[in-house]
Amino acid sequence: MKATPRIVHVIESCGPGGAECLVKSLLLEMKRQGGDVALWVLTAMAQIDPTNHSRMSFEGRFISDLTRDGIPVEILGKSPHKDWCQTDRKLRTLSRRYGPAIIHTHLESVSFHVVRSMCFARSRLIQTVHNTKVKHPWIVRYLFAGAFSGFVAISKRVKDIALGVGVPAGKIHTIYNGIHLSAFAFPDREIRTRAVSVVAIGRLTEQKGHRTLISAVRLLKERYHAELQPFPKITIIGDGELKGTLQQAIRQEGVEQDIRLEGVRDDIANVLRKYDVYVMPSNWEGLSISLLEAMASGIPVVATDAGSNSEVVDHEENGLIVPVSSPEALSEGMYRLLKDRELRQRFSQNGPEKASQFSIEECARKHLHLYQRVSFV
């Protein structure tokens, strides 16, 4: 068998996002499978949001989890929207020190800086396409398509998007995201007769569609009140730039007593275990780590038909799929799950079976195989 090449992954920050959490899990599993891996991070959380203690703590645990397992982590110290030339120099210095055979980038902004720095004279470049919304398609078409030796599409839908913006078909490799399935396995999950709680997990950004969820909660509350029924509590886990806007929307919709913004949590398995229904109101998606975790945990799921959600959720089999940006449809889906214990029971039983297709072990194995193919071409 050919030797495993030295592999470096590059991300923007160690924040609580799906792409970042995937990278951490992937590096740890590739290390376990014999990979020679390291992580380079462009920007420290102290340069992004120094007063946000929960995000700072998340970053600390993120780095500690990697270094404890012998995975080097390098923080370049790039300020947001600044320090381009300094970043170029640091990337070239790290490239000389590490001598990676593979530099694997995540997100367009990171890929741009890596290509611009010309740090990869002796390395092959791989980029993961994480989303169905490409911010700068012309950069992908005219710069990345030639500079990168391969692209990882995290779903069939994402592969179609990559093809549409000019990535050569021969360079695209579909590798589904993976999670640690055992961490979310709850065979003793209780499906209560009366569902009393709903949770949504995701960054507070336009992508995640929380404004639609807030409007759907108002409609759902009106329906419950017409039936003279006590209304469930809705919790949103996450943080982001729209926090203030969403707080204002919650007040405007009159649901201040019904929706709680809980901020960042690092015990998502425990969160999923104690709630009755999981809702994903996204406007667009790649392949959501949070959705995979929810399915694996057996919590009944209602999700919008955004991005690759329908590649995970089989409508009426292991969850509900509803139209994007429709508070009415989302409200109806939530109502069905909350009211129908037999439906919740069926989805709870079928969800983990579907999630079993998305293991981090298989994800890591396929990445290592790709690196060997690309390195020895």
Image: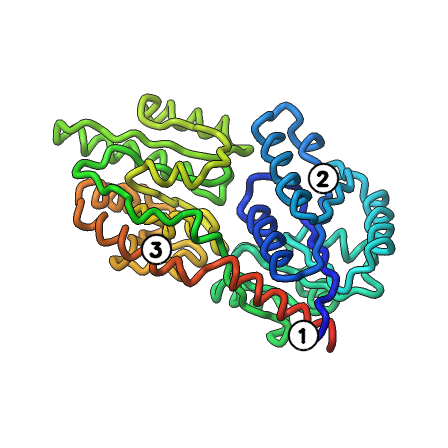
Number of the label disc, if any, that sits on residue 373: 1
Q: Check if mark 3's residue and mark 1's residue have beta carbons within 8 Å.
A: no
Residue at 85%, 43% (x, y): give it: 86
Label 3, secondary structure: give it.
helix
> Picture coordinates of residue 50 (x, y %)?
67, 26
Q: Position of residue 320 (x, y in %)?
A: 29, 53
Left or right, 318 with respect to 280, comes to left
Of tags 2 and 3, which is closer to the observer? 3
Q: Quadrant of the N terminus?
A: bottom right
Q: Secondary structure at mark 1?
A: helix
Tag on residue 352? 3
Give amino acid for label 1: Arg
Q: Residue at x 37, y 32 (%)?
A: 235
Q: CA distance from mark 2 to mark 3?
A: 36 Å
The front one of 61 and 315 is: 61
Point out which mark residue 43 bears.
2
